[in-house]
């Protein structure tokens, strides 16, 4: 039996021939498949044949996955030919015995590699024809220049498209139809159109071919068991992903050879246009509604988070030069820079998506880009209720606290949904209030008319001109704010925020990194100590006087985000001197996401009820 073995850490791939039953996998030299890594056990797993089927057994405590399914000790998982077995940094797949000859040429991985190689040749020829060395500084605002790019690209593709064999054509058609089907599911579910899948110049599109593609996509979507409800778009996308392969097989034969060639030409043209004029292989990922985060690890590996689960993609950059030019396109419009002297930068895309970039010498695997996508349409409180993030009673209570101008700190880990909840709650501030938002990279979008958005700025190349969050908080106090909303408190600005809350700027909101409400109050103390040396008791008194509520959010293993605690900051414990918190609502069972009232009534509840902001029913 033969296996594909791919080492993700070194991007080395090879074919192994193994004649044994069972086949043991591990670090020990006696294993049939030896994986040299400290993260692999001596005898890590084994493949056992039972009749005509194969099963993977986990032999130790190390992680083993088959087709993204965890293999638990004592519970073998069936593995088919082509299923990826993941152990540490290694990927392993059985090659079907009667397809060995084809596997070298037509395996999914090899077809993708050949497609990328073809696109790289087209791109290189285009650069040579236009006498360009890099693509990071093209004059994309000049229509004549863009037209020159498109015209040359059209001529090159027309001449070279017939170099592709049928297997590679079918692979490319499958990739493009998958993109279009996902876009169509989003359109029918939420009424949001992904325009990014069009070529830069519609004059180069064939209307009859385009009509055929639209009809085929509609037929494929009709064959899928979808609900098309705005609240179930995540479920519909998951169903579309799962059923796409079978549906594509049914439709594929109805596509003429000329139509397939047209789709390939259209796909390759778009990919090259993205590299020349957009963000390369990241461009369509930014438009996919079921992708919430994009992670680039060097030029060869791009991962995405879909529905809370991280998974690899088949995309990659042609070379380091292209990746560098894409980074420049991201950071230049927002006045940021990244080089060996400043190898770490935060930025944002025009749509508000948050970007973090880190390069050598801090990154040892090449440039890394992490993009936290900003939702096309901001979440509402009803969206959070539908997703089980919080209960209707808690939503009503938190709305009342915002309207009643209570100071709220949202606490949680990375990716737990702090900013989403902050953006959602901020929308309930009164329209006649002057609101000042302060962020490291601006991503909050509030519907109120009188919003002043401030964004920090790093130092320039001479080390001057930096404006920190603390600088902006101090300046905001001179701007006559009704509310101050700080995207995230993570430094000495915590002191200025507490002082602002204590000097008449009620209704302020912010987020903080912490795992529990108690941790959040203690982290506030630590951050204040970064700004000034003062007695801890005095800091705690400021926390008690300033903060009314701590809302704790968490992200669970299945990707769900939940509010787990809503706690009031009450007083200092006379015995220990610590900040006392009283839980108002808690999440007792994550499997049944319903926040329950603990029986505690917050001290400010009577005031909100008397002002007719909340009803006593929220506590029942």
Image (spheres, rainbow, N blue to C red):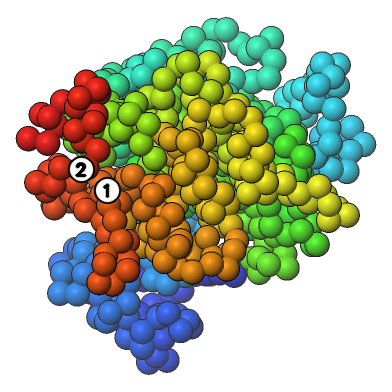
Q: Dot 1: within a 10 Å radius of its alpha carbon, few (fewer than 14), some, or many (20 or more) residues? A: many
Q: What secondary structure is found at the residue carrying circle 1?
A: strand
Nearer to the camera, 294 or 403:
403
Q: Which residue is mark 2?
A: 602
Q: Which residue is mark 1?
A: 568
Q: Going 77% across and 39% down the picture, which residue do you hit?
A: 335
Q: Are marks 1 and 2 in contact (CB under 8 Å)?
A: yes
Q: Dot 2: within a 10 Å radius of its alpha carbon, few (fewer than 14), some, or many (20 or more) residues? A: some
Nearer to the camera, 2 or 487:
487
Q: Quadrant of residue 161?
A: top right
Taking 550 as reference, is 512 left or right?
Answer: right
| Quarter of the N terminus within the rendering | bottom left
Residue 26 percent across, percent down from the top left? 37, 83
Q: Above or below — where is 495 with respect to 214? A: below
Residue 165 percent across, percent down from the top left? 58, 39
Q: Which label's residue is closer to the chain start, 1 or 2?
A: 1
Q: What secondary structure is found at the residue carrying circle 2?
A: loop
């Amino acid at each position: 039996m033969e296996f594909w073995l791919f080492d993700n850490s070194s991007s080395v791939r090879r074919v192994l021939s193994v004649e044994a039953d069972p086949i043991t996998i591990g670090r020990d030299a006696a294993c049939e498949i030896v994986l040299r890594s400290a993260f692999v056990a001596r005898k890590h797993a084994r493949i056992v044949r039972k009749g005509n089927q194969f099963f993977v057994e986990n032999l130790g405590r190390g992680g083993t996955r088959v087709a993204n399914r965890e293999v638990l000790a004592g519970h073998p998982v069936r593995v088919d030919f082509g299923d990826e077995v993941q152990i540490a940094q290694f990927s392993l797949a059985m090659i079907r015995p009667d397809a060995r000859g084809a596997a070298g040429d037509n395996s999914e991985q090899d077809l993708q590699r050949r497609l990328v190689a073809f696109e790289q040749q087209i791109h290189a020829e285009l650069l040579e024809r236009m006498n360009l060395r890099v693509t990071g500084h093209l004059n994309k605002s000049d229509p004549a220049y863009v037209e020159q790019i498109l015209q040359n690209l059209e001529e090159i593709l027309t001449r070279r498209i017939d170099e592709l064999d049928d297997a590679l054509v079918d692979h490319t058609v499958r990739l493009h139809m998958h993109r279009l089907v996902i876009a169509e599911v989003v359109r029918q579910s939420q009424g949001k159109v992904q325009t990014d899948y069009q070529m830069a110049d519609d004059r180069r599109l064939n209307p009859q071919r385009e009509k055929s593609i639209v009809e085929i996509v509609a037929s494929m979507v009709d064959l899928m068991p979808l609900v098309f409800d705005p609240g179930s778009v995540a479920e519909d996308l998951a169903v579309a992903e799962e059923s796409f392969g079978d549906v594509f097989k049914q439709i594929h034969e109805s596509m003429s050879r000329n139509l397939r060639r047209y789709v390939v030409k259209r796909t390759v043209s778009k990919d090259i246009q993205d590299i020349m004029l957009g963000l390369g292989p990241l461009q369509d990922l930014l438009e996919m509604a079921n992708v919430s985060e994009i992670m680039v690890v060097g030029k060869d590996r791009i991962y995405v988070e879909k529905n809370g689960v991280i998974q690899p993609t088949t995309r990659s950059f042609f070379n380091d030069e292209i990746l560098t030019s894409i980074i420049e396109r991201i950071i230049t419009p927002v006045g940021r820079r990244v080089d060996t002297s400043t190898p770490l930068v935060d930025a944002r895309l025009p749509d508000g998506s948050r970007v973090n970039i880190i390069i050598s010498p801090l990154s040892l695997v090449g440039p890394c880009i992490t993009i936290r996508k900003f939702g096309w349409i901001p979440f509402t409180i009803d969206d959070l209720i539908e997703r089980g993030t919080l209960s209707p009673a808690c939503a009503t209570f938190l709305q009342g606290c915002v309207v009643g101008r209570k100071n709220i700190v949202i606490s949680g880990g990375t990716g737990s949904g702090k900013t989403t909840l902050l953006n959602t709650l901020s929308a309930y501030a009164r329209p006649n209030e002057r609101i000042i938002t302060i962020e490291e990279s601006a991503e909050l979008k509030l519907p109120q008319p009188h919003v002043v958005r401030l964004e920090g700025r790093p130092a320039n190349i001479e080390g001057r001109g930096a404006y920190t969050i603390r600088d902006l908080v101090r300046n905001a106090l001179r701007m006559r704010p009704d509310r101050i909303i700080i995207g995230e408190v993570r430094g000495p600005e915590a002191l200025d925020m507490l002082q602002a809350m204590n000097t008449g700027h009620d209704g302020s909101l912010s987020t903080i990194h912490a795992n529990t409400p108690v941790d959040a109050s203690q982290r506030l103390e630590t951050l204040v100590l970064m700004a000034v040396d003062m007695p801890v008791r005095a800091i705690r008194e400021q926390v008690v006087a300033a903060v009314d509520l701590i809302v704790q959010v968490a992200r669970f293993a299945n990707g769900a985000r939940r509010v787990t605690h809503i706690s009031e900051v009450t007083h200092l414990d006379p015995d220990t001197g610590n900040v006392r918190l009283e839980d108002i609502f808690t999440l007792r069972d994550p499997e049944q996401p319903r926040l329950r009232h603990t029986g505690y009534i917050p001290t400010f509840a009577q005031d909100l009820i008397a002002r007719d902001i909340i009803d006593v029913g929220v506590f029942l």
